[in-house]
Amino acid sequence: MDAVIFDFDGVVVDSEPVHFARFRDVLATVGLELTEADYYDKYLGYDDHDCLLIAAGDRGVELAEPQIAELTAAKTELVQQTFRESIEALPGAVAIIRAISAASVPLAICSGALRDEIVLASRTIGVLDCFQVIVAAKDVSRGKPDSEGYLVARDKLAHAAGKDLRSQRCVVIEDSPAGIEAGKAAGMKVLAVATSYAAAHLADADCVVNSLADVTVAELERLVR
């Protein structure tokens, strides 16, 4: 492998329930209801801005950019408070991240979450130092399912490693159809983890597992052969 690039929420940490609850809370302040089913079926995988914009639009409300910024800031504060109090790694995530790092394979995070949230959570679970690059929501102009984030992560990793990294030898680890689409559009192999969606919804990935506890570095290597 030339590199491994992880999505974060729902892949490394068990944070999607937190994000749903906080999106629900801030949307309620403007009179909009967000159900758990709608969040997981329609909005998971979007960054904060697009989730708020699209969820409100689906409910017949057009949010102005300043209002989206205010709601995003409120949601971020609530998420970070929860992360400081309790955030846990998903099964197998810490072990495989450390194993990839020990194998000297370049590692990045590519997520629609905010950088501060990623740093806080990854430091809390003890893997922040394993990643050479973090690409967060504000580092790209187009979120998933666009490929921009994964291509930016590859290029930044290549710069950090001092060598070219080939897309076809990069492995993306994702948990959503939008993320799978982004990774495949970047020309990368995708391993999907059925933490947020049933395996049937992740069929476009090159490999689907129930847990990262089921994954080894050797198995990731086989995806690029």
Image (cartoon, rainbow, N blue to C red):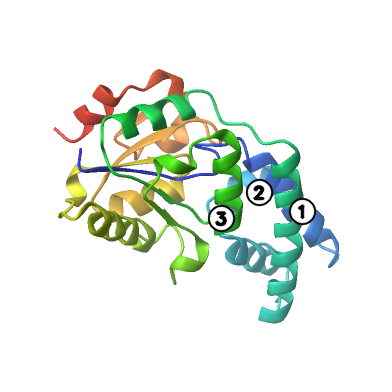
Residue position marked by numbered label 3 in the rendering: 113
Q: What's the residue type where badge 2 is placed?
A: Tyr
How far from the left and from the top, in percent, is residue 22? 75, 51
Give the CA distance from mark 2 to mark 3.
Answer: 15 Å
Q: Earlier in the sequence, mark 2 or mark 3?
A: 2
**Residue found at the very far top of the displayed protein:** 214
Secondary structure category for the residue under label 1: helix
Secondary structure category for the residue under label 2: helix
Q: What's the residue type where badge 3 is placed?
A: Ala
Residue position marked by numbered label 1 in the rendering: 78
Quadrant of residue 155 within the rendered picture: bottom left
- Quadrant containing the C terminus is top left
Q: 152 or 99: which is nearer to us?
A: 99
Q: Earlier in the sequence, mark 2 or mark 1?
A: 2
Q: Residues within 10 Å of mark 2 (few under 14, many from 20)?
A: many
Give the CA distance from mark 2 to mark 1.
Answer: 17 Å
